[in-house]
Amino acid sequence: MKLAVRVAASLTLATTAAVSAFALSSTSATSIRNSDVLNSLPHLRDRGAQGQRRVPVFVKGHSALFAEAESGASAAVATRGGFVDSLKSIDIPLMVYFFLWYVGNYYYNISNKLALKAAGGSTGFPMTISSLQLGVGCIYALFLWAAPDARAKPKISLDDITKMLPVAFCAMGAHSASVFALSAGAVSFGQIVKSAEPAFAAVLSQFVYGKKVSKAKWFCLPIIIGGVILASVKELDFAVSALVSACIANIFAAFKGNENKKLMDTDGIKDRLGSVGNQFAVTTILAFLMSVPIFVAKEGAKWGQFVDIFKTNPVLSFNLIASGLYFYGYNELATMTLKKTGAVTQSVANTAKRVIVIVGVAIVLGESLDPIKLLGCSIGIGGVFLYSIIDSLLAKK
């Protein structure tokens, strides 16, 4: 069973990496040129050269795949066209992105928790593991830039990097605080507390960034907070440090969202970055560099001990590397997925993701699923979903 789980995790990791590297990189890496397709199908190319009519049978995103048909075969063409029309309504790449995003997030939470446990939990090396996870993502990002035809390098200036520092710092803070929260308590509990992020975002948007939050959204916040409190009442693995760390992660995440919006509204920087993937890569590299002095100051004296555990304990080494790749992969997939969808779809996707991670990880890791905890979880996440769509619902009335 353990071997099967490890093989499944490795295959999922490899698939996620492949999609992130090539399917999400650039138009040239994802589109199929007609000439390439016809060259690979000589019998179609030759028949086309004889003057027979070409009928488009599959159009998706960028390019068309053409097949040849006899001019008299009108019935077959009509049947094939109907089948193609039904295929057009299904965005298969988007479905794949959703699937890999969820799977990557799920496996990240499992591998992250296993690495933290193997290193001693909250009293071990949470900051070291957090920093090294970002470092693994940096190596992967650099590989994509170095690999032929994988991803074009960004053309940013020193001034652009300076403007990205606030986003990178908030990303580092959110990730580090989340890792510490998950090291101190149950993954399910940490995820429940993190689901209250909209409450923090509303306060910051209203009072720090001057962006008005509607009254309807404010009325949703007590539901979210109440659900989190209810879920915490009978939490068997409750720790104040986990609660505080998850709240700090929410604050950093709320700041990151607002700073990221400011960054993308800056003239020219979006074009110089070239893609959302490059933006995430540069942010990750800067976040890693910022995290190094913190982990050195906090856990640097125990670095030799950590290296010994890493060398002798395969649970730590495997899950540390895997969690770093999963973290990078699922975040980039989530960014690309949400970019292709609307606000309501985003809300549904994030809500479903929370439920899957909380319940699935709790089952795998043997964490408590007390009915009161599940009720609080349902109320809190339901409040988050309502918060996300309430303005749209009221606008339609």
Image (cartoon, grey):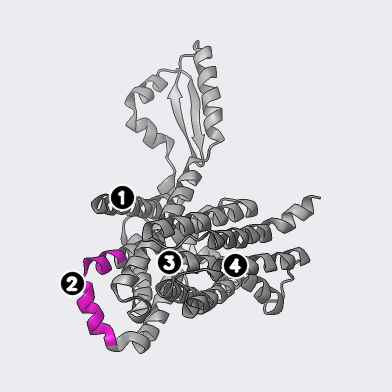
N-term mark: 2 or 1: 1
Q: Residue at x 56, y 62 (%)?
A: 372
Q: Nearer the viewer, mark 4 or mark 1?
A: 4
N-term mark: 4 or 1: 1
Answer left or right for 287 relative to 139: right
Find out whether residue 318 is within the magenta segment.
Answer: yes
- Mark 3 belongs to which amino acid? Ala
How far apart marks 3 and 1 lie (CA) works out to 26 Å
Q: Which x, y percent locates residue 214?
A: 76, 66
How far apart marks 4 and 2 lie (CA) works out to 41 Å
- Stretch in magenta: 302-319
Q: Residue 228 or 8: which is nearer the viewer?
A: 228
Q: Residue 236 or 242: which is nearer the viewer?
A: 236
Q: Residue 126 or 265: which is nearer the viewer?
A: 126
Q: Which residue is the site of mark 4?
A: 230
The crowd level at tag 2 (other Cα within 10 Å; few <14, some 14-19, many 20+) is: few
Q: Nearer the viewer, mark 3 or mark 1?
A: 1
Q: Which residue is the site of mark 3?
A: 281
Q: Are marks 3 and 4 in contact (CB under 8 Å)?
A: no
- Mark 4 belongs to which amino acid? Leu
Q: Which residue is the site of mark 1?
A: 8
Q: Which residue is the site of mark 2?
A: 312
Q: Which x, y percent locates residue 74?
A: 53, 13
